[in-house]
Amino acid sequence: MKVKGTYSINYDTYYVVVEYEYYWKDKSYDSDFEDELTIKSITLDNNDITDFCYEYVKEDLIQDVKEYAIENKYENLN
């Protein structure tokens, strides 16, 4: 299954929004569980910083978004 979602962080002095797609395939008798997170965009106070994040930001933000996507995957099913 594949879902789209939004992860946001509202800090004291800035606001970050991450748009993502999360794909997963549940484990079955003939295949293992698989999942993949695709970050579509990252904005900081309405400025696109997607490329900057991929080049300079540690994996912490990406891991936070993946954990959020996994926890909320059934809320965004269409």
Image (spheres, rainbow, N blue to C red):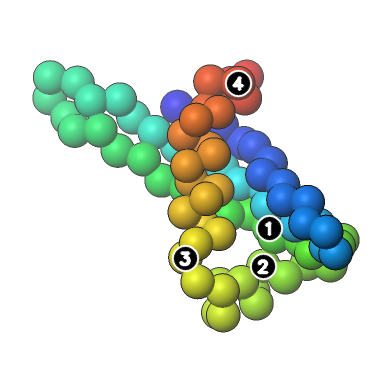
The answer to which of marks 4 and 2 sits earlier in the sequence is: 2
Comes first in the chain, label 4 or label 3: 3
Q: Nearer the viewer, residue 66 or 36?
A: 66
Dot 2 amino acid type: Thr
Looking at the rendered structure, the secondary structure element under dot 3 is loop
Q: CA distance from mark 1 to mark 4?
A: 20 Å
Marks 4, 3: nearer the viewer: 3
For the residues marked 3 and 2, what is the alpha-carbon distance in whole angstroms? 13 Å
| Badge 1 or badge 4: first in the primary sequence | 1
Q: Residues within 10 Å of mark 4 (few under 14, many from 20)?
A: few
Picture layout, residue 11 above or below residue 58:
above
The amino acid pointed to by label 4 is Glu
Q: Residues within 10 Å of mark 3 (few under 14, many from 20)?
A: few
Secondary structure state at the residue bearing disc 1: strand
Tell me, yes or no, whether the two marked residues, 2 and 1, touch with CB atoms within 8 Å. yes
Position in image of residue 16 (x %, y %): 75, 57
Q: Can you tell which mark lies on residue 41?
A: 1
- The residue drawn where x is 12% and y is 19% is 29
First-in-chain label (3 vs 1) = 1
Q: Is residue 38 visible?
A: no
Amino acid at the residue labelled 1: Ser
First-in-chain label (3 vs 2): 2
- SS under mark 2: helix
Q: Which part of the image, by quadrant, shows the C terminus?
A: top right
Name the residue tied to disc 2. Answer: 50
- CA gap, disc 3 and disc 1: 15 Å
The image shows residue 23, relative to residue 44, as above or below, that is above
Task: Indicate the amino acid at tag 3.
Answer: Glu
The residues tagged by marks 4 and 3 sit, at their Cα atoms, a distance apart of 25 Å
Mark linked to residue 59: 3
Numbered tag placed on residue 75 in the rendering: 4
